[in-house]
Image (cartoon, grey):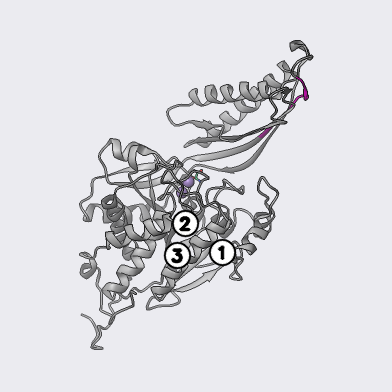
Amino acid sequence: MTTRSAVLHSPKSATGSLRVNGGRLWRSLMELAQIGATPKGGVRRLALTGLDGQGRDLVVGWLKETGSRVEIDGAGNIFATRPGRDPAAPVVLTGSHIDTQPSGGKFDGNYGVLAGLEVLRTLNDAGIATEHPVAVAIWTNEEGSRFVPVMGGSGAFAGVHTLEHLLQQRDVDGIAFGDALKDIGYAGDAPVGGRALDAYFEAHIEQGPILEREDKIVGVVTGALGLSWYDCIWTGQDAHAGPTPMEARRDALRGASRMVEAIHALAMRHVPDGRATVGFMQVSPNSRNVVPGLVKMTVDMRHPSDEHLATMDCELRDAAAVIARDLRLECNLQQVDHFPASRFDSSCVAAVRAATRALGLPHREMVSGAGHDAIYIARVAPTSMIFVPCKDGISHNETEDARPEHLEAGTNVLLHAILARALGSRVTSDSSGTEGG
Ligand code: HGY
Ligand code: MN
Ligand code: MN
């Protein structure tokens, strides 16, 4: 049980030697990873499932133990706020997500939430009083795997989409976001958005190979790629695999297959920064002796340049039109999600860089290839991110792994970046009641 000990005055220099408890952080990560644990050592905790509810319950319990006030908003976003001396001061916020991919890992998102928890625990252990409140957020449905849009909870918080739009979204089985949220007991009554934020910092594993390849421990994240998501439906004609002559077929799976190759070729025309992926495909009727008449597939395209992303969009549409014509198919290609390339706030990037240097950690600046809640929170608050390496750069994979000492180092950077914003300049009285010098 970590409670707040006697309040000590804490000029910035007095907190410079403060460090988090890496062992406690690791134990929390491993305990949370048990909820939705998979046989290969990963985690399957899809947004708004019972397992997501259990994970939320566990972490909310830990957050409450720090003495923080816990609130839940209408999108199911959770906020645990540790009071500052000035309750009216804008909040210094950190956090991430605990929903995972279907075959996800222990650290994607979970690390950023539990690093925030570790910061609260460390501030309590040291009896640090900050000027600004410090809070930890758990954002709903970051992965976008079960429900589109990706980063749904933070997107509603930032006003990117309305709460109504989010609550109406349905998963592949037709279950509505709002119903699933109610079913796990996290349809909160706090307003979505509108909180005064001083800054937002998010710690996350890199999910790529750069830091490990360059032997760096911290990525000072300056921004993120732009992203466009599409649903693509190919319609031909179900037909018997035997009597139907080859030239008479309208085979939707041939259309989808050519599209997969066209998408790969498209991305290769935009390397090294262009990315495109087909991650989901549903074939109907999916029977070995029926020519498929319907195929649903998804497209994920990314680039750090909005112009390039727009060019990729045109090339995608052109490819679909040619394939549909050549194979006598219908193609319904719809963009279902998009956010432009983003650049994080220079003062928050500077706070992360300064904390990293003060801790003497090998680091580099980098742009995130993955989407994160920070991308949307950057629209309503000065924001930046802290990356740490993951093993072989692998993520969205059950074998996702990270080293305890790297996770601890990144959390120390998070602690000091938060303190740089939250301590404020006023020095409080110490426990004897005298005014600090
Ligand atoms: O898709 C992404 O980049 C994130 O993992 N949701
Ligand atoms: Mn993530
Ligand atoms: Mn992810």
Secondary structure of residue under mark 1: loop
Q: Is residue 391 magenta?
A: no
Q: Residue at x 42, y 69 (%)?
A: 63
Q: Position of residue 197 (x, y in %)?
A: 46, 65
Quadrant position of residue 31: bottom left
Q: Is residue 197 visible?
A: no
Task: Give neighbour class at mark 2: few <14, some 14-19, many 20+ (Cα, 10 Å).
Answer: some
In the image, 375 versus 113, the foreground residue is 113
Give me the residue at 63% from left, 37% from top. Answer: 230
The tag on residue 193 is 1
Q: Nearer the viewer's eye, disc 1 or disc 3? A: 3
Q: Which residue is mark 2?
A: 35
* Element type at mark 2: loop
Amino acid type shown at disc 2: Ile
Position of residue 276 measured from the top left corner of the image (x, y, whole percent) = 52, 31
Q: Residues within 10 Å of mark 3 (few under 14, many from 20)?
A: many
Magenta range is 232-240
- Pick whichever of labels 2 and 1 is earlier in the sequence: 2
Marks 3 and 2, how far apart at CA:
11 Å
* Observer able to see residue 184: yes
Q: How many marks?
A: 3
Task: Answer with mark 1 or mark 3, whichever residue precedes in sequence.
Answer: 3
Kind of residue at disc 3? Val
Tag 1: amino acid: Gly
Residue identifier under label 3:
59
As measured in the structure, the alpha-carbon distance from the residue carrying label 1 to the one carrying label 3 is 22 Å
Which image quarter is the N terminus in?
Answer: bottom left
Name the quadrant containing residue 247.
Answer: top right
